[in-house]
Image (cartoon, rainbow, N blue to C red):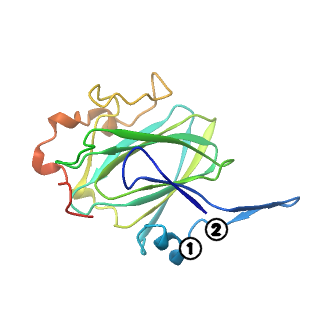
Amino acid sequence: MKVIETALPGVLLIEPRIFRDPRGFFLETWQQARYHEAGLPEHFVQDNLSLSQRGTLRGLHFQNPKAQAKLVSVLQGEVFDVAVDIRRGSPTFGRWASVVLSGDNQRQLYIPPDFAHGFCVTSEQALFFYKCTEFYTPACEAGVLWSDPDLGIEWPVRDPLISDKDARYPRLRALPPERLPRYGTNE
């Protein structure tokens, strides 16, 4: 397994070792000791799976409190995946990192707690899988507007399919400070 730092400290791109032969391939998507040694948490409490069509954009989501770290991957299809540092006081506050995840490249992205996360489907469909370190808690759910001009995320779609909820999220600067996580509290 290869672990690659992204532009945001703590956001890690993981390239699992893939064993290919004429029948197909095999890889470990999670092995507690090996991933912990690479800096990921030891325990995940919830797995999620979503199916989305081309042009769907989900995000930018986070929970505070009860922040979730996520290990995300694509089982089928392709997505443009984004993590945004939303920690008040962070030297990288408001910056984002992106990677392309696909069923072909089998890459994974680890997003630490206190980062917003979103993705956009660039294939006909995508089967998106993620492990979370905290349970989904509706009362703690929040988000940042996907098209926030202050962030300047270069999404690969102009007019995405988004939920009403995602369309109503505020810009990062409009979120009350107490709604955002504070840098250094979950590290």
Name the residue carrying label 1: 31
Q: Residue furthest top?
A: 158
Does 96 sit left or right of 126 as displayed? left
Residue at screen point 57% across, 37% down: 53
Above/below status of 32 relative to 76:
below
Residue at screen point 52% across, 78% down: 33
Q: Label 2 amino acid?
A: Glu
Q: Label 1 amino acid?
A: Gln
Q: CB atoms at circles 2 and 1 under 8 Å apart? A: yes
Q: For numbered disc 2, what is the local secondary structure?
A: loop
Residue 171: percent from left, percent from top: 23, 33
Which residue occupies the foreground of this view, 58 or 26?
A: 26
Does 2 sit left or right of 63 as displayed? right
How many residues crowd around disc 2 within 10 Å: few (fewer than 14), some, or many (20 or more)? few
Residue at screen point 16% across, 40% down: 175
Snapshot quadrant of residue 96: top left
Q: Residue furthest right?
A: 22
Residue 180: percent from left, percent from top: 18, 49
Residue 99: percent from left, percent from top: 51, 42
Q: Residue furthest bottom?
A: 33
Q: Quadrant of the N terminus?
A: bottom right
Task: For marks 2 and 1, give the CA distance.
Answer: 7 Å
Which residue occupies the foreground of this view, 42 or 159?
A: 42
Which residue occupies the foreground of this view, 179 or 96?
A: 96
Snapshot quadrant of residue 168: top left
Above/below status of 116 relative to 38:
above
Name the residue carrying label 2: 28
How many residues crowd around disc 1 within 10 Å: few (fewer than 14), some, or many (20 or more)? few
